[in-house]
Image: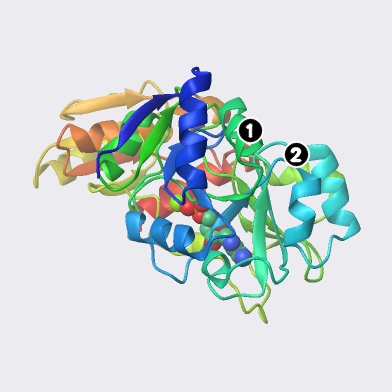
């Protein structure tokens, strides 16, 4: 299939993207986090096509994207007070809620589990699509399974050209890192994946939040798998003082790329990206930098360790998974 490149600035192209989706097709679209690969969430065939295009294991459930609380409610068997409070504060935005699901949600979306993940994106292009379609969209990140999430339309094409109907180009994603995933319908709220919304923001509203799936949980969150969000190159993380030694060591096996945070000296590297010292700026550029180093043929990437501060939790998590 030919993958069409559509513009999120063009109302005609948005109409076209919506009609492809309504017909059961797959369209990648920008969100404030990363590009999502959308398909009709309530149509099992469309959802299966998403898994096939990504090469995603059928055991990894999808996030369902909706306009807001009204559209999320029919998908969820319960809507506890925490959900109402969280949604009032953080939607539309990069917070995904995991709740007990209703019958209308296909097993394909939930990977057969009893819960569904829902989120209302704030990106205008995502909202324009949802408004046109009038139905929820299942949308995992628009990359081949386990690869680095895409933050531009070019990244999407690099992974999925010829495998999906279209990509809607809306420029770079403002957060650049996936949504925070929080389970709320099953005892105290639990953080299933760190992400664009820091844990401290959730705790300001809810009080202390547990980390990771409950022990009895029947649906652990596969986003917690050890290796994920990973480039083709081997990734290693080291403190600034050890970075140059690491570059020398990795250099024995081929070109080495570097992701640096400070002005640390990194002679011997094939390419160096210096990312922002601010967690938000770093997150926005991280995936593009990893993909760029991969595209330049780096066989390994040496990453300067990031601060040990809660604001950097999600970034530390993604780096650890890329390096696993
Ligand atoms: P992605 O959209 O590719 O960033 O991945 C979706 C993330 O949401 C994965 O980490 C999933 O494990 C998580 N997720 C989706 N649905 C559920 C669910 N029903 N229960 C727990 N985690 C979920
Ligand atoms: Mg993903």
> Residue 102 occupies which quadrant of the picture?
bottom right
- Give coordinates of residue 54: x percent, y percent: 35, 55
Q: Which residue is mark 1?
A: 127
Extreme residue in the right direction: 81
Camera-side residue: 152 or 286? 152
Q: Which mark is residue 91?
A: 2
Graded by Cα atoms within 10 Å as few (under 14), some (14 to 19) or many (20 or more), the crowding at tag 2 reads some
> Residue 182 occupies which quadrant of the picture?
bottom right
Distance, label 2 to label 1, CA atoms, is 12 Å
State which quarter of the image contains the C terminus. Answer: bottom left
Q: Sequence order check: which comes first, mark 2 or mark 1? A: 2
Q: How is the image coloured?
A: rainbow
- Give coordinates of residue 260: x percent, y percent: 36, 29
Is 28 left, or right, of 311 in this rendering?
left
> Residue 79 occupies which quadrant of the picture?
bottom right
* Mark 2, secondary structure of its residue: loop
Of badges 2 and 1, the one in the foreground is 1
Extreme residue in the top direction: 9
Above/below status of 238 relative to 282: below
């Amino acid at each position: 299939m030919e993958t069409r490149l559509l513009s999120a600035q063009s109302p005609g192209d948005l109409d076209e993207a919506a009609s492809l989706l309504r017909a059961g097709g797959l369209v990648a679209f920008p969100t404030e986090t990363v590009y999502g690969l959308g398909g009709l969430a309530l149509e099992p065939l469309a959802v299966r096509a998403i898994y096939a295009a990504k090469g995603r294991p059928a055991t990894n459930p999808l996030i369902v994207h909706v306009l807001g609380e009204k559209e999320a409610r029919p998908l969820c068997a319960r809507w506890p007070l925490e959900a109402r409070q969280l949604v009032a504060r953080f939607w539309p935005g990069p917070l995904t809620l995991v709740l007990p699901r209703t019958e209308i949600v296909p097993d394909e979306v939930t990977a057969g589990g009893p819960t569904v993940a829902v989120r209302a994106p704030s990106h205008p292009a995502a909202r324009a699509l949802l408004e046109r379609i009038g139905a929820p969209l299942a949308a995992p990140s628009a990359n081949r399974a386990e690869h680095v999430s895409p933050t531009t339309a070019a990244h999407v094409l690099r992974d999925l050209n010829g495998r999906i109907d279209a990509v809607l180009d809306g420029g770079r994603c403002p957060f650049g890192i996936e949504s925070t995933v929080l389970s709320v319908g099953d005892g105290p709220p639990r953080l299933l994946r760190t992400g664009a919304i820091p844990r401290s923001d959730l705790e300001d509203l809810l009080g202390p939040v547990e980390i990771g799936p409950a022990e009895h949980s029947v649906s652990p969150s596969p986003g917690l798998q050890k290796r994920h969000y990973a480039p083709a190159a081997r990734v290693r993380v080291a403190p600034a003082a050890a970075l140059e030694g690491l570059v020398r060591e990795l250099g024995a096996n081929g070109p080495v790329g570097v992701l640096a945070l400070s002005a640390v000296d990194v002679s011997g590297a094939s390419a160096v990206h210096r990312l922002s010292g601010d967690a938000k700026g770093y997150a926005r550029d991280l995936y593009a930098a990893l993909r760029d180093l991969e595209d330049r043929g780096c066989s390994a990437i040496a990453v300067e360790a990031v601060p040990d501060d809660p604001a950097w939790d999600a970034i530390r998590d993604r780096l650890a998974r890329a390096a696993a």
